[in-house]
Amino acid sequence: MLEIIPMLKIHILGMGPGSIDFIAPYVLTCIKDVDILIGGKRHFQEIEVEASGKVCQYISSDLLGLVDYIKTNRNKKIAVLVSGDPGFYSFLVYLKKHFSNEKLVVIPGLSSMQYMFCKIGLPWQDAVIKSLHGKTFDFIEALNDSGLVGVLTDSAFTPQLIAKELVTHGLGNVLVYVGEELSYAEEKITTMIATQMANNERNFGMNVVVIERTENVSYKR
């Protein structure tokens, strides 16, 4: 008689902004319970004790190969570790192209954007939040509409470049907050008006940017 091997659900775990101090206790419980962990280098550095004895698979550029690996091991308990919250610009978007909701269990985490807004003491329910990872968006228009914009940056769209765009559109007096290495011991929050940030020579590390219009400043096209 052919043995039927049960297919287990794949857990997508939000790992928070970085430090293990901000990983939810239930996420750590899930990590201890699985057979296979899939994640990035920084994830595994934070959970060395919890990941001990597990099969640890790094996320590489071969995403389709990773999907095949997951499909091959569906009879094992698998957890995919994603930075921040799974619902906020994470690997979950790609996984949902290959696995239905019935095959996934998604566990929330604290996003770097949530963390950043708390660090600078600003409510963010009305903010426009976007990612500049390999893409662009009109953050000038967004700032004009809402007065508050959160941006996930990349190596191409630096805080200085964002500030220069603001200055070009007559928004040199808006506040620019830059959060580096959030939740880690090296964390640093820098606050400047856009004209100052545009000329800042600092080579910022991994960062999140928040732009706040604190006065009635109109912009120009």
Image (cartoon, rainbow, N blue to C red):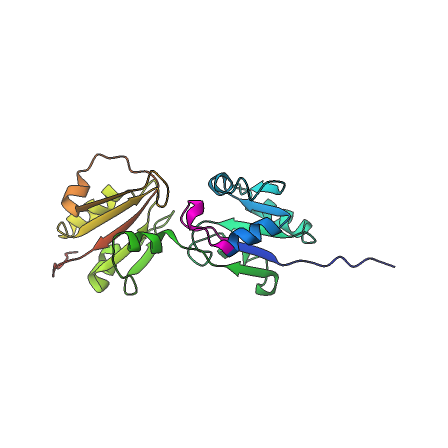
Measuring 82% from the left and 57% from the top, which residue is drawn there?
3
Query: Nearest the camera: 2 or 180?
Result: 180
Q: Does residue 120 appear anywhere in the picture?
A: yes
Q: Which quarter of the image is occupied by the C terminus?
A: bottom left
* Picture coordinates of residue 220, whole percent (x, y): 14, 56
Residue 113 vertical position relative to residue 51 in the rendered view, above or below:
below
Query: Nearest the camera: 185 or 98?
Result: 185
Q: Which quarter of the image is occupied by the N terminus?
A: bottom right
Query: Nearest the camera: 135 or 94?
Result: 94
Measuring 59% from the left and 63% from the top, which residue is drawn there?
100
Q: Is residue 211 magenta?
A: no
* Picture coordinates of residue 2, whole percent (x, y): 84, 58
* Picture coordinates of residue 34, whole percent (x, y): 62, 50
User: Across the whole image, how many numbered discs are drawn on residues?
Assistant: 0
Q: Does residue 94 appear anywhere in the picture?
A: no
Report the span colored magenta. 13-25
Q: Is residue 22 magenta?
A: yes
Residue 3 vertical position relative to residue 162 in the rendered view, above or below:
below
Asked if residue 80 lies left or right of residue 143, the reply is right
* Picture coordinates of residue 85, whole percent (x, y): 44, 55
Asked if residue 86 lies left or right of residue 202, the reply is right
Asked if residue 91 lies left or right of residue 100, the reply is left
Asked if residue 70 lies left or right of residue 220, the reply is right
